[in-house]
Image (spheres, grey):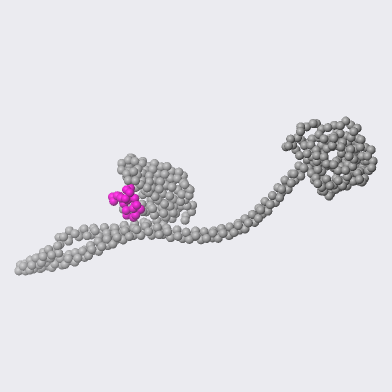
Amino acid sequence: MEKSQTHSLHNDTLLFAEESKTPSPESEKPYKLMIVDDENEIHVMTKLVLADYEYKGAGLMFLSAFSGKEAKALIRENPDIACCLLDVVMETKDAGLEVARFIREDAKNKKLRIILRTGQPGKAPENDIILNYDINDYKEKTELTNQKLFTTITTALRSYDHLEELEKKSREILAKNIRLNEEIARRIVAESNLTKYNRSLEKMIESKSSRLKEAIRSLEVTKDALQKMKKTTIISDISILSVDTVDTSNSIIEANLSKMNQYRQTMTHLLEKYNVLEKIITSHKGEKQKKANESIQQIDAYKSQTNFDTLLKDYPGIITESLRGIEQISNAVSDIKLFVSINEEPFQPTDLYLLLEDITIARKKVISKNIDIQLNLEKVPISFLPRRHVERVFNTIIDNSIHAIKSHGIVSISCQYLEPDIIVCIRDIGCGISKEDLPHIFKPYFTGDKSKGKGLGLAFAKSVIQSCDGDLEITSSHNEGTMVKIVLPVKETDT
């Protein structure tokens, strides 16, 4: 085998890479450079030229093969070879080309940089080699001087590093894709489970909604029943007290009417006697005077027996008591009708802000100058309410506050909207309500001051506010004052 060009490495001055510092234990791992050539001199000279070579702080590790067979063995044992200086003609004229094919096809090594070196270019034309084999460079041994060898190796290692980085990125991307696919798979399973859960939840919500609607309907029925019960309870309280009044009045009237009937019989009999006497006196004179005197004596005896003077004295009082009893019955019936009428008034749009303003203006015209009514009103939503009854409630409570102030003081009225309710507060610094009386203030006919009213005002007010689904609370301290808090829900329609 002709090797006439092997002297080429001696023709130029030897050029070495710049001398670098001795690598520390932490230095970069050296790049593996495989020299495949059947001439030992080529191996020696190549190692000599590249002995001090460094790229990115890493040197070279030389692997030598003197035949295609040895080269294949090294490639199998060292899959991380970075670069191969490959001779074409060795034991056969295409042994080097077979090694190139082996690297790419059998070993599946796409990173290893193959630099084909030949001393007989005629046997391996460059164009044919580049087109038919996956090699990275083609050099004739005559042109591969020290400097060009340095440049060629550096270019090959740079390409190898790029491929290494690309492979690393590819592995990272592959790992991320695997994790992403796993995550997608988990999410698909999770979404499937979530879909099943949502279906189950929808069915459960539908079932619960159905039960809730039924419960709401039941609650509405219960609410109506409770409302009627409230009305019945207050009427019952009034009725119980009123029945006692009616029973007492009936007893008085019955007893008085019985007496009146007795008195009527007595007076009728007495008048009959007087008629007889009158006839006797007018028809008989002289000898019959004696008989007339006897009749007069009988009349006087009857008058004494029937206590006629007392009858005449008591008769007007009996009539008066009977009339009072009738009046009490009428009042009791009126009280019952008042509470019955609470749920009969239609609800209508009501502006509580304007209503309280109007009531205050009217009150200021008639109250003492020593009492001041102060307003702290905010605009509130229009609400459907029984306006006439609500107005009566406010008037009653404001009147109570005014009456609780003995000489001079202030009644304050505030109104604000705290969704979903309108809050009205009426305060006074008056005589207050005693601790003993406070639990009873909403009972019909209970009043701390017998001279003022008959004790139905607060019971009526409580009943009206409850009929609007609201609430009325009173807090008070004796001789310190009273606060009445009224809570009314905003109703947008006539319910």
Regarding residue 264, the answer to whether it shows in the image is no
Regarding residue 461, the answer to whether it shows in the image is yes
Residue 441 located left or right of residue 82 = left
Identify the magenta region: 433-452
Q: Which quadrant holds residue 188?
A: bottom right
In this view, 4 is above or below 268: above
User: Considering the image in quadrants, where does the N terminus appear?
Assistant: top right
Q: How many numbered marks appear?
A: 0
Q: Residue at the spot x=46%, y=46% of the render?
A: 417
Q: Residue at the spot x=41%, y=42% of the render?
A: 375
Provide residue 409's location: percent of width, then percent of height.
Answer: 34, 41
Q: Nearer the viewer, residue 296 or 96?
A: 96
Q: Is the stretch drawn in magenta largely helix, strand or loop?
A: loop
In this view, 365 is above or below 221: above
Q: Nearer the viewer, residue 10 or 143?
A: 10
Provide residue 252's location: percent of width, then percent of height.
Answer: 25, 61
Task: State yes or no: residue 25 in magenta.
Answer: no
Provide residue 7's location: percent of width, then percent of height.
Answer: 92, 35
